[in-house]
Image (spheres, helix red, strand yellow):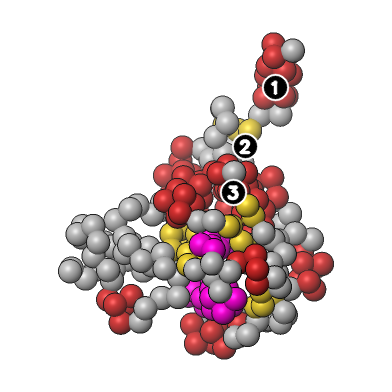
Amino acid sequence: MKLFKKIILSLIDILMPGRCYICGQIIEGKSSLCPECYKKITFLSHQCCPVCGKPYLFPQEKEAICQNCLKEKPKLKRFRAVFTYDTYSRELILPFKHADRTDMAPFFSKLMFQTGQELIDDCDIIIPVPLHPRRLLKRKYNQAALLAQGIASLCQKKMLSNTLLRVINTKPQGHDNRRQRIKNVKNAFLVKKEKDVYGKKILLIDDVYTTGATLNACAESLYAAGAKRVEGLTLARVCHFFKENY
């Protein structure tokens, strides 16, 4: 039976070879990016603020907290992302987010699992950032929920997709600044079942972190419902490297 399965999989690889998610070039093995496109993605290293995860340009002490976090304590106790959101990574994320490329979810989930291992190990529950029902009906799927489900499968932890709800159909935030985004998502989220999150350590999952307004609004709702700790993990983040030395 195993031999038969290997033969079938080999035939599939020959007849339907894998293609790079960005350039479409045929690639060997189980990789989803060709070597050239892989090099163009700016993966975020562990040389970052231990709280917000924003990368430092120069080496810092391991526990050096950035000035932003010292000035304004984030609602998320810790946050991490796999790579920066830029010209190249945008070509990866937009098809997944807006063009029904749900087949990309397992690849992204594995990357997030590897990057966020410490956060994942420490959490009790994994919760995706929800879409409003109207937006979900239009898009047909919640990309954050697909990522969360993939991560939950890899770590064998509970994923709750109907506990945190988006009760306000917020407008798209693509061109909004931080202040506008905070105002846009204010009171937009609600915990349906407080008993599901009370006293729990929760890991929030989303695709892109821009200003943190959405994740922070989710964290506020979870804390109001009694969550013990809320942390965040996304596939990408918009960021400017810190140059300060500490």
Whether tag 3 and tag 1 are in contact, CB under 8 A, the answer is no
Pointer 3 local density, CA inside 10 Å: few below 14, some 14–19, many at least 20: some
Q: Which mark is residue 157?
A: 3
Q: Which residues are magenta?
A: 200-225
Q: Position of residue 79 (x, y in %)?
A: 43, 63
Give the foreground label among 1 and 2: 1
**243 up-or-down from 233: above or below:** below
Q: Could you tell me which residue is drawn at 49 percent across and 68 percent down? A: 228
Label 2 sits on a secondary structure element that is strand
Give the foreground label among 2 and 3: 3
Position of the N terminus by quadrant:
top right
Q: Nearer the viewer, residue 51 or 181?
A: 51
Q: CA distance from mark 3 to mark 1?
A: 29 Å
Q: Amino acid at mark 2?
A: Arg
125 is within the stretch colored magenta? no
Q: Amino acid at mark 1?
A: Leu
**69 up-or-down from 49: above or below:** below
Q: Which mark is residue 19?
A: 2
Q: Position of residue 55 (x, y in %)?
A: 33, 62
Pointer 2 local density, CA inside 10 Å: few below 14, some 14–19, many at least 20: some
Q: Nearer the viewer, residue 121 or 27?
A: 121
Position of the C terminus by quadrant:
bottom left
Indicate the quadrant where residue 175 lies: bottom right
Q: Is residue 105 visible?
A: yes
Number of numbered discs visible in the structure rendering: 3
Q: In terms of sequence position, does the residue under pointer 2 or pointer 3 come before the other?
A: 2
Q: Amino acid at mark 3?
A: Lys
Residue that numbered label 1 is attached to: 9
Indicate the quadrant where residue 224 lies: bottom right
